[in-house]
Amino acid sequence: MKTFPMFLKMTGRSVLICGGGEQAAQKCRLMLKTEAQITIAAPALDEELSALARGGRVTWHMDRVTVETFRGRALVFVATGCPGLDASLHALADEAGALINVVDQPELCDAYTPSIVDRDPVVVAIGTEGAAPVLGRQIKTRLEQELEPRLGDLVALAGRLRARAAARLQPRARRDLWRWVFNGPVREAHARGAEREAARMLKETIETGKVPEAQPAPVALVGAGPGCRDLITLRGVQRLQEADVIFYDRLVDPGLLELARRDAERVYVGKTPGATQWPQERINALLVNAAKSGQRVVRLKCGDPGIFARGAEEAEALAEAGIAVEIVPGVTAASAAAAAEGEFLTKRGRNDTLVLTTGHHEDGRGAPEWLAQLQSGVRVAVYMGITKASDIVAALDRGGLADQTEVLIVSQAETPEQQRFRCRASDLVATIADHQIPHPAMLFLSLDQAEQMSERPALRLA
């Protein structure tokens, strides 16, 4: 980011707008929504600004503009409509140390005016650093449609009752309360115009301390997807925003962590191949201890937590400790890798069976005995198969299939470093070596269409 988004408290602070025409009026309309003290500096004002000055809504500065005119202002808008005059006024304001916005001259701006969705006290500001204001307005339009017009009134009600909730409820119970308010019947009633009903439900819930809606399990095993942050599910994002602590893997997109609450603790528990810093037992113990301490926990795992991600081991450890677990599925690497190549994992008339497997035994003895399933109409997706490529090729070669098996290799799927290669199984080891294909990578194996498997012997790996 070249700019830092921040909401400025404007109550009683002085804002200066240079210009007396339509551009200045636009900025004035915006600032009139705040509690700032507005001064208009111009030799003449259009009718709209003149009316505001006569009504005492703004102060009209008709005298000569100097450096002192800008001194002490919280914010300055330069909007005369004349680029040369705007640049001169900018120089004076800059000498006074003011925070400046110059209309239509982003190179002279210290601050940019965002597109605003106003549901006071809820305010959404969309900025593009002056590069694409049209896009900012498009995003604003979508949010205007998404947020009900009277949402601000509900938020104001919640604000008035916040102290009462804090006095009666513990921190976690309060988060559960507000989650229920803004995701359930209170918001629905308020949106349809039943404000009194919404207020009654909220007040009664605060008094009883019992949130009617069941809350998520203390620990959520969340699938982060295979690479880029936009492949996580909406439910996964919601659990991130609810979490007090997040334990995340080595391959999780760092951008995903930005979706969590700012005050949520983030704990890296990534396993590096060959390293022992984070054995599974240690991770299990961390999850159990965090949940027992009363924290809401997210275990953020690459891909899908139920596919070669040791999610079952973590769930079992939590269950043995009497802790409830929610499984939030994610896009698995096989799906993402195939999509990255523009392919489908199954296709009628070509392959109607999909085998998901891994290149490693739990005890490290080598690849598992799954190649016997490779036959016509079957696609085998191998996770973590790069280091076992020679074992896979040897088994295929023993069955006379190394030259008849097509291999698609997708490395680091759905990331900027994604690579894709196709080869025969007989060339797999050389292809990996020649291109220095890194982890993580998926291998997809399938037989040529013409290959008939009925007569071949079963394949087994040594």
Image (cartoon, grey):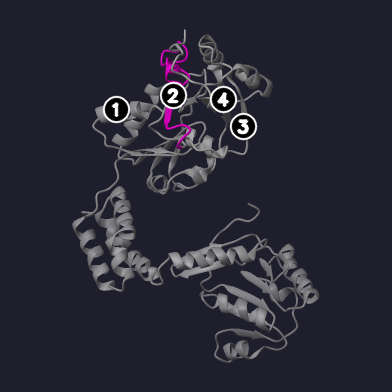
Q: Nearer the N terminus, badge 3 or badge 2?
A: 2
Distance (Cα) linking label 2 and label 1: 22 Å
Q: Is residue 112 visible?
A: no
In the picture of the structure, the residue carrying the numbered disc 3 is 420
Q: Is residue 427 above or below residue 51?
A: above
Distance (Cα) linking label 1 and label 4: 36 Å
Disc 1 secondary structure class: helix
Disc 2 secondary structure class: strand
- Whether label 3 touches label 4, CB < 8 Å: no
In the picture of the structure, the residue carrying the numbered disc 4 is 407
- Residue 357 is labelled as 2
Would residue 204 be found to the left or right of residue 112 on screen?
left
- Disc 3 marks a residue whose amino acid type is Arg
In the picture of the structure, the residue carrying the numbered disc 1 is 316
Which region of the structure is painted magenta? 348-376
- Percent of width and height locating residue 95: 75, 67
- Percent of width and height locating residue 387: 55, 18
Would residue 301 be found to the left or right of residue 163 on screen?
right
- The picture quadrant where one finds residue 448 is top right
Q: Nearer the N terminus, badge 1 or badge 4?
A: 1
- Disc 1 marks a residue whose amino acid type is Glu
- Disc 4 marks a residue whose amino acid type is Val
Disc 3 secondary structure class: strand
